[in-house]
Amino acid sequence: MRLDQFSGIVAFVKVAEARSFTRAASELGVAPASLSEAVKGLEERLGVRLLNRTTRSVGLTEAGAHYLDHVRPAAEEIRAAGAALRETRDRPAGTLRLSLPWIAAPLLIEPLMGPFMDAYPEVRLSLIFDDNFVDIAAQGFDAGLRIGELLEKDMIGARLGGPLQTVVLGSPDYLARNGTSKRPADLAAHRCIAFAFTRTRAISPWEFVVDGRQVEF
């Protein structure tokens, strides 16, 4: 069976039940001519007449009655599925699966989780925290949070929150024993705790603004 044979089935079932192209078109919210073309196309693809048409009435042929018995349950499921989708457009429900770096938990997720769950009680949140930025589409996620410069070129992004500023810190004990750096270049003489990307094992550089220029160490 070719895939295009599915086209027109719902139209045929509606016309067969209403015994009228005009009434069926009114119920479906389409033009009678469009409905007639859909059913005609279905008949041509099947190679059999399904409906007997006169200027005053529409009736089923023997083949049409047999075909209706077989396809009506499927058409009902298609209509029910469409109605369910229309109902959920204005009432979000289901599972929302997000890929998130750990830093997003205290900055964005924790403050928003309570209000979000109150506003959308029928949404189940599935939050996967992993600093190894996975392929969102391939891994079955609906969306994800990424640091700006790590956004893939083909991803559609929307900014959440303001810019983040990184601060270099040292414990009082460490600074008492090793001295306090005066400029970024001094960090080469210190023992620094750096972040390594899980996938590439590359060390994430520290970014500074020196004399108006952005530099990395």
Image: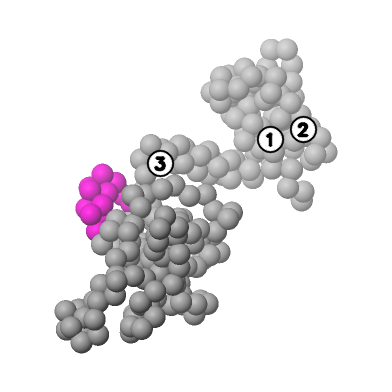
- Res 52 seen here: yes
Residue tagged 1: 8
Mark 3 vs mark 1, CA separation in Å: 25 Å
Q: Secondary structure at mark 1?
A: loop
- Res 131 seen here: no
Residue tagged 2: 41
Q: Secondary structure at mark 2?
A: helix
Number of residues whose C-alpha sits closer than 10 Å to that of mark 2, classed few (under 14), some (14–19) or many (20 or more): some
What quarter of the picture does the C terminus occupy?
bottom left
Magenta span of residues: 110-123
Which image quadrant for residue 75?
top right
213 with respect to 4 (left or right): left
Mark 2 vs mark 1, CA separation in Å: 7 Å
Q: Residue at x 80, y 39 (%)?
A: 45
How far from the left and from the top, in percent, is residue 202?
50, 77
Residue tagged 3: 88
Q: As rendered, which of 126 and 22 lies closer to the eye?
A: 126
Which image quadrant for residue 42?
top right
The answer to whether 133 is drawn above or below residue 148 in the figure is below
46 with respect to 122 (left or right): right
Question: Of marks 2 and 1, which one's residue comes earlier in the chain?
Answer: 1
Question: Of marks 3 and 1, which one's residue comes earlier in the chain?
Answer: 1
The answer to whether 112 is drawn above or below residue 132 in the figure is above
